[in-house]
Amino acid sequence: MPKPFEYAQGMRNKIVEKQRKEIKGIYLEVLKELQDEITTLSYKDDMSENLKIKYLKSMKKELEENMRYADKKMEKTIRGNMDNMVTAILKDNQTFLKGMGFHDYMSNGKAMRDIVERVASGNLYKGKWSLSSAIWGDNKQKLNEINKIVAKGIMKNKGVYNIAKDLERYVNPRARKNYNWSNMFPGSRRKIDYNAQRLARTMVQHAYEESFVAVTKNNPFIEAYQWITSGGSRVCALCMDRESVDHYGLGPGIYPKDKLPLDHPNGMCTFDVVITMSNDEIADAVADWYLGVGDKSMNKKIDKYVKDLKKF
């Protein structure tokens, strides 16, 4: 039997890569606005101290506004990609259902929105965290770092142009920031988009896992889940353990449907369903259920599953 959720696994990788470029592009837009401002500054380093402070305040205010706009755009981008991830899972599930003979049960948009909201609102994590609070908390940190860069430049008696160039380097997601940068501006990040990229990947990954579990947990033909690492040399010890150790006596990396652990932040592992029945055996079981004959225990499980399908 082909892997029922193979399409969604591939889409997860495509969504994450597209999202990486989108987030980098958002910061490049902020960079472009700043660079346009910098082109007018090269001849203004001889201005008076009062005028210099006034000019820096104006430039910093504009940069802060652009940063806030960028983070609004980023939140919308992440939510959209979570939607796309859940849609891919639901599409795979529809194909899977048709293969089993359930042609009348199609996934709906409300289910998708509920799953995305469960992850984005922080309800999944049972705490005060949410996607929005994480983005705006990171925004506050970035604005604080911008203030420190400007303040340090003033303290060092740098000209407006040189301070602006420091800000340009800070904002540029492609800029290399070496040891000297950390010495000049201790505590400021080396990659402007690192936290955003990490958050975005985590949100898409958790939307993927949550929707995968939601549409499969009551399927009577799926017996368990299998953890599959992303492969390569960078797989962490935790994920290697989840894939290779038999934690529940079901086989290496096999989890009961109510025991699949949530992937860690920045995780990129995938999941598969464990089905031991053949296609013919599944078809026969569905036919018996439809006719009201055969294994009563299986028929009850299918009844429960059909009720669950109405949610999706």
Image: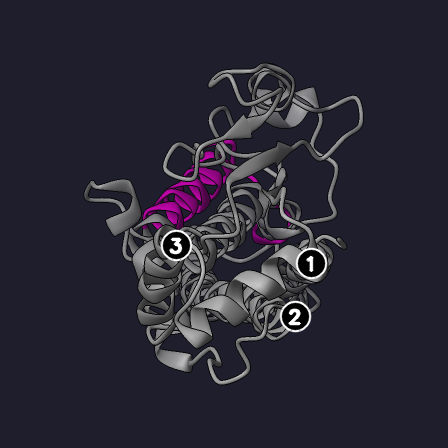
Q: Residue at x 34, y 76 (%)?
A: 310
Q: Position of residue 61 (x, y in %)?
A: 39, 63
Q: Is residue 122 rendered magenta in the image?
A: no
Instruction: Residue 218: give its label.
Output: 3
Instruction: Residue 312: give its label.
Output: none
Element on which disc 2 rests: helix
Residue bearing mark 2: 99
Report the number of numbered marks. Answer: 3
The residue lying toward the viewer, choosing from 57 and 267, is 267
**Label 1 vs label 3: CA separation?**
18 Å
* Region in magenta: 137-162
Identify the image quadrant of the C terminus: bottom left
Q: Is residue 94 above or below residue 228?
A: below
Q: Is residue 11 above or below residue 150?
A: below
The residue lying toward the viewer, choosing from 248 and 91, is 248
* Residue type at the position of mark 1: Asn
N-term-proximal mark, 1 vs 3: 3
N-term-proximal mark, 2 vs 3: 2
Query: Would you identify the image quadrant in which residue 89 lies?
Result: bottom right
**Label 1 vs label 2: CA separation?**
8 Å
Of labels 1 and 3, the one closer to you? 1
User: Is residue 87 in sight in this rendering?
Assistant: yes
Instruction: Residue 279: give its label.
Output: 1
Q: Residue at x 80, y 27 (%)?
A: 232
* Residue type at the position of mark 2: Gly
Question: Going by the image, does 9 lie left or right of 59?
Answer: right
Q: Main secondary structure of the magenta part?
A: helix
